[in-house]
Amino acid sequence: MAWLSRALRVAATCPPPVLGPRALTGRAGPTTEKSVPYQRTLKEAQGPSAVAQGPSQPLPSTANVVVIGGGSLGCQTLYHLAKLGVSGAVLLERERLTSGTTWHTAGLLWQLRPSDVEVELLAHTRRVVSRDLEEETGLHTGWIQNGGLFIASNRQRLDEYKRLMSLGKAYGVESHVLSPAETKALYPLMNVDDLYGTLYVPHDGTMDPAGTCTTLARAAAARGAQVIENCPVTGIHVRTDDFGVRRVAAVETEHGSIQTPCVVNCAGVWASAVGRMAGVKVPLVAMHHAYVVTERIEGIQNMPNVRDHDASVYLRLQGDALSVGGYEANPIFWEEVSDKFAFGLFDLDWDVFTQHIEGAINRVPVLEKTGVKSTVCGPESFTPDHKPLMGEAPELRGFYLGCGFNSAGMMLGGGCGQELAHWIIQGRPEKDMYSYDIRRFHHLLTDHRRWIRERSHESYAKNYSVVFPHDEPLAGRNMRTDPLHEELLARGCVFQERQGWERPGWFTPQGTAPVLQYDYYGAYGNQAHEDYTYGCLLGDEYTFDFPPHHDVIKKECLACRGAAAVFNMSYFGKFYLVGLDARKAADWLFSADVSRPPGDGYYLAVGGAVAQHNWSHISTVLQDQKFRCQLIDSSEDLGMISIQGPASRTILQEVLDADLSNEAFPFSTHKLVRAAGHLVRAMRLSFVGELGWELHVPRSACVPVYQAVMTAGTKHGLVNAGYRAIDSLSIEKGYRHWHADLRPDDSPLEAGLAFTCKLKSAVPFLGREALEKQRAHGLPRRLVCFTVDESRWTL
């Protein structure tokens, strides 16, 4: 028997074991069976290779939907498709249900997360596994409600938990903030000496992967769906329609093909390989993720599951024992993903895992003398932002993703399976799934291996970190820079990152703050950066109070209100909509009246963070409506400079060769003018509620135009400003920002933007019927802006 404390000493003195997959099924050659939590699943997989026996049932020649992958997401998606009335839905699993990554998952379900949408998704999963499936099938899924306990060992963490409790209260999730003494009474074996408090959620619990997936498959089959095991997919057949649009046509397997217009990629770690079959980029990486199962612990029965974020460790109740796992800064990448890996595990690297043992022993001291019964180290898929990949792939119509769940596929599976089913049936989810939508990633990033690897690593390593409002990644930076990047860097710009773009956050008067190459936080033999200016400034942001540079940003805001500020907004997406049906397309796409003379095109400027999502949405609508027009992306060809403030007209009048008076240049109009000898498009618009213009400038002219503006503005108090100032200034004026204030599940009426809708005209547009119905029935909610008597800047 190996004591946990002894494992620490062994790891320090012995060479690490050889890594490699250890199959737990009865394949050729002897194997050593490990004692792991899900014995029934393992025992069922023993014997001759199941793949050699052929598919578990005959393949249909056609299907309305084919789901690839029999893990949590595949089974949940099939179940919800069947429950929503989709006939002819088929799930294909290359081996047995759960055989990939689902079978070895810890199965934890925590109901509270910082996002209201995720709280709802988790609540639906809980309903499905704890109530719905048992009522429908009479089978118990293995759900255990033993509660969950979040540990706060500092004040900021406890503040974060109090916000979670408030969010949970709004959505009916019972939770309680406990003192250290109350925590000790609830969990007598816990060390509470270093605690500020805990968050207790009594209805959290644990799911059994095998029991849940088996019951989901049974419930889906009862509604006419098919589950076919032992049927590896070998290819995706694609056709090109008369408009040149690529669409799914069929799924090829080792045992025949299925004609289908819709495929759902729920292949987990293997999702990238399935994507390559269809020419679809799936940005995820595979990593080793581990936990150990202890021997019996007296007094641990019925204790809640524990998540100690600051120690980056979790403790899962395992009957009369505990499973101990977490997220480390140096996870092991699975470089060559094997398509033969099923019900398999890797040998545990104790050098990597040791840090979790230290945290676990500190929290539950009895573990120091508790034996290790088994180790469980299996593959999991992780994504660049630690969010799942869902929705229709922009490269291929009818090809949907439901993968990359960052070891949270069990707990998010029910909610996400339901939303994915809605997505497939009606073309959109019911909830705001933007944060999970594959279209959130720019197409230049989704197959950039360095970016995917760096960002996935950082997201994994920081999974348990406090979520601060102004945190920025250090990984995958400087991927996309505009022509003004070096100019602004020299002037003290502290950059933010949005979908690969470096955009100005604010300007420090203390010199330059370049973003350096990612150092993996010193892991994998990399030298951690020392005296890293950008990293130090970012560290100052790790607070829920005002950061030390709050007054610097305040000065940018005051300059814009009192004189003028210049904002570099070059990261915006810039598109042209042109062609015979451009006007028809614009009338249908846009809620406002944007009618133009026949034959004219449209120039679209959209926020850079959502540019790819907008591009994909517009392209999809053009395809579905068969409009004869084209969307052209000029984002990399044009820069965008915004000059805002009372002095903006005076400054720009010295730079532009046009009359900028109200009569000659009204608000919300644009003209082609010359600036410092260069042809630019000037638009009189404002995001901050001040007099101002945007200059849309050819890439080669950005630097000379910017320098001319700065020279002209010197005597008028013009300053550089960033998006931190824009956020504050726009809030003051009640201007709405996408995804900070507005989401896909907000309607224009709810958001106070009815003036942007041509409802007084007879022109049809996408969403008009829904708006008219909502207006007739009354608004269930409204977005409003409140002001307070206390004078404080919002940053």
Image (tube, helix red, strand yellow):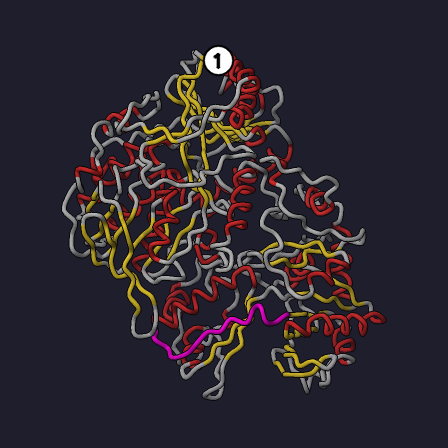
Q: Secondary structure at mark 1?
A: strand
Q: Position of residue 373 (x, y in %)?
A: 40, 17
Count of labels in the image: 1
**Amino acid at circle 1:** Trp
Q: Which residue is mark 1?
A: 3
Q: Residue furthest right?
A: 715
Q: Residue furthest left?
A: 58
**Residue 379 vertical placement versus 724 (above, below):** above
| Quadrant in the rendering for residue 336 | top left
Quadrant the N terminus occupies = top left
Q: Position of residue 118 (x, y in %)?
A: 45, 45
Residue at x 73%, y 57% (from the top left corner): 493
Residue 602 seen in render: yes
| Quadrant in the rendering for residue 548 | top right
- In the visual, does 328 lie left or right of 378? right
Q: Position of residue 620 (x, y in %)?
A: 39, 67
| Magenta segment includes 634 | yes
Residue at x 18%, y 42% (from the top left corner): 55
| Quadrant in the rendering for residue 213 | top left
**Residue 540 vertical placement versus 667 (above, below):** above
From the viewer's side, name the closer residue of 36 and 760.
Answer: 36
| Magenta segment includes 540 | no
Residue at x 34%, y 45% (from the top left corner): 267
From the viewer's side, name the closer residue of 47 and 91.
Answer: 47
- In the visual, does 123 lie left or right of 29? right
From the viewer's side, name the closer residue of 236 and 770.
Answer: 236
Crowding at mark 1 (Cα within 10 Å: few <14, some 14-19, many 20+): some
Numbered range of the magenta stretch:
625-639
Residue 184 seen in render: no
